[in-house]
């Protein structure tokens, strides 16, 4: 699909109207040559509210559609962003594929939130459907597009690597006190626990930092994986009860827990034959100012580091300043008083602006993004290897054919 004049204005349809879709609206305010023209969610109130929000932000004209088919065949969208929960992504992609193959939907591209699939099998199906429909496809891994990650990688690979050699270790961590919605806590619907939900970020940003700029993303060959998972907080009786009160009886961590802590190590062989490593640590058991992202890159004579909570802006609120819970300072905020960091622009710091700008420009110019469904499938393979290692208590060697049909223990029936 490469070539031809760029589309003057890309018209996006959002599939899903929850937390992550609202983040994309926030990010798209800083992206040129794009309009949000459609929203579909099976919940009428949600889709109507998001369409109203898009219009209030002057990202439209945007309208809510009563069905996914109606939006796809309307002629009013050029590309779609899949923002539905994990358990609905493959069925959504099947519907996109059906309507594009029939000729009723005229789309240029599809972008999908992380993870691409709950299993490697699902991720490969997502990729197969996108390619069979001849669609451009982008994997929405926001941390890869964080301005800190992009700038840090540029400096390291431009100034340090030519003199001293390639980096050999990337460390990444993402931690907070737990997800917003009940389905995240239900392993069969989500695909697992924190390893599925957050390690997908950490392993991919680590792989990106270790990858040579301009080289194929397959430049790094995964050769082994080892992991440990645990239930540190949310299976304690008092927190089982608290989780039920917050999420409803359908979330029962006494009976069906998923891991709230995961630690993994992935070993790759780089293009020069050296072994390099990604270390990832993730938890739903971190109680601090809010969401914390830590990223490091180490090489022979250099290093880089980033922490999302080491902000330049902080506020102090005394105990006399009272108010209800909110997340206006940082995502997953855990307190409303004291000395607190403020993430000035979460959509930028976390990478959503860079991510959406890149995807819009790629689709406008009819070229494949740098993060595609191929990368989403590689992430799924890394996650399944880590889950398998944690299950058997051994290092998993890659390639491993058993991962093609593997389902993490907590997600099995």
Image (cartoon, helix red, strand yellow):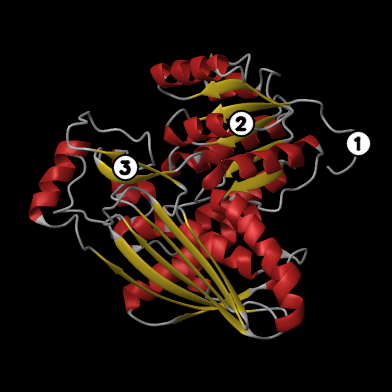
Q: Which residue position is annotated with label 2?
A: 28
Q: Kindly report the distance in space between the C-alpha atoms of the residues bearing marks 1 and 2.
A: 24 Å
* Closer mark to the observer between disc 2 and disc 3: 3
Q: Which residue position is annotated with label 1?
A: 4
Nearest the viewer among 116 and 239 is: 239
Q: Quadrant of residue 318?
A: top left
Q: Kindly report the distance in space between the C-alpha atoms of the residues bearing marks 2 and 3.
A: 23 Å
Residue 113 placement (x, y as % from top left): 53, 44
Residue drawn at the location 20% of the way across and 40% of the way down: 250
Residue 155 placement (x, y as % from top left): 69, 64
**Relative to 197, residue 31 above or below:** above
Label whose residue precedes the other's in the sequence (2 or 3): 2
Residue drawn at the location 70% of the way across and 62% of the way down: 154
Nearest the viewer among 201 and 148 is: 148
- Report the side of 219 relative to 173 (left or right): right
- Label 2 element class: helix
Where is the N terminus found, in terms of image quarters?
top right
Where is the C terminus found, in terms of image quarters?
bottom left
Label whose residue precedes the other's in the sequence (3 or 1): 1
Nearest the viewer among 373 and 167 is: 167
State the mark number for residue 333. Answer: 3
Q: Kindly report the distance in space between the C-alpha atoms of the residues bearing marks 3 and 1.
A: 46 Å
- Asked if residue 404 can be seen in this view, the reply is no
- Report the side of 250 relative to 297 (left or right): left
Residue drawn at the location 59% of the way across and 16% of the way down: 62
Nearest the viewer among 159 and 86 is: 159
* Closer mark to the observer between disc 1 and disc 2: 2
Q: Quadrant of residue 244?
A: top left
Around disc 2, counting alpha carbons within 10 Å, would you say few (fewer than 14), some (14 to 19), or many (20 or more)? many
């Amino acid at each position: 699909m490469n070539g031809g004049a760029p589309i003057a204005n890309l018209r996006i349809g959002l599939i899903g109207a929850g937390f992550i879709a609202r983040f994309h609206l926030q990010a798209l305010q800083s992206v040129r040559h794009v309009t949000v023209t459609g929203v579909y969610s099976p919940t009428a109130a949600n889709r109507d509210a998001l369409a109203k929000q898009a219009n209030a932000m002057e990202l439209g004209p945007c309208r809510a559609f009563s069905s996914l088919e109606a939006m796809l065949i309307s002629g009013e969208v050029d590309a779609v962003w899949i923002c539905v929960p994990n358990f609905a992504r493959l069925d959504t992609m099947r519907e996109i594929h059906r309507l594009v193959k029939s000729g009723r939907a005229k789309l240029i591209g599809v972008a999908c939130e992380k993870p691409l699939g709950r299993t490697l099998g699902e991720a490969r199906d997502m990729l197969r459907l996108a390619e069979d429909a001849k669609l451009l496809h982008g994997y929405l891994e926001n941390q890869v597009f964080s301005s800190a990650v992009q700038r840090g990688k540029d400096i390291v690979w431009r100034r340090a690597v030519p003199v001293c050699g390639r980096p050999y270790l990337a460390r990444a961590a993402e931690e907070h006190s737990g997800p917003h919605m009940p389905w995240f806590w239900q392993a069969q619907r989500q695909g697992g626990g924190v390893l599925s939900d957050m390690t997908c970020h950490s392993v991919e940003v680590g792989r990106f930092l270790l990858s040579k700029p301009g080289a194929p993303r397959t430049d790094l060959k995964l050769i082994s994986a080892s992991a440990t998972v645990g239930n540190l907080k949310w299976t304690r009786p008092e927190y089982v009860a608290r989780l039920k009160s917050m999420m409803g009886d359908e979330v029962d961590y006494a009976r069906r827990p998923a891991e709230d802590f995961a630690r993994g190590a992935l070993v790759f062989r780089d293009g020069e034959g050296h072994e390099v490593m990604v270390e990832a640590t993730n938890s739903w058991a971190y109680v601090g100012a809010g969401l914390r992202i830590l990223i490091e890159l180490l090489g022979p004579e250099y290093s880089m580091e980033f922490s999302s909570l080491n902000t330049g802006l902080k506020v102090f609120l005394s105990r006399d300043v009272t108010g209800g819970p909110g997340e206006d300072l940082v995502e997953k905020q855990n307190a409303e008083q004291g000395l607190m960091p403020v993430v000035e622009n979460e959509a930028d710091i976390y990478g959503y602006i860079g991510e959406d700008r890149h995807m819009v420009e790629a689709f406008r110019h009819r070229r494949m993004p740098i993060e595609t469904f191929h990368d989403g499938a590689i992430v799924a393979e890394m996650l399944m290897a880590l889950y398998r290692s944690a299950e058997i208590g051994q290092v998993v060697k890659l390639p491993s054919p058993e991962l093609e049909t593997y389902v993490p223990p907590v997600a099995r029936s």
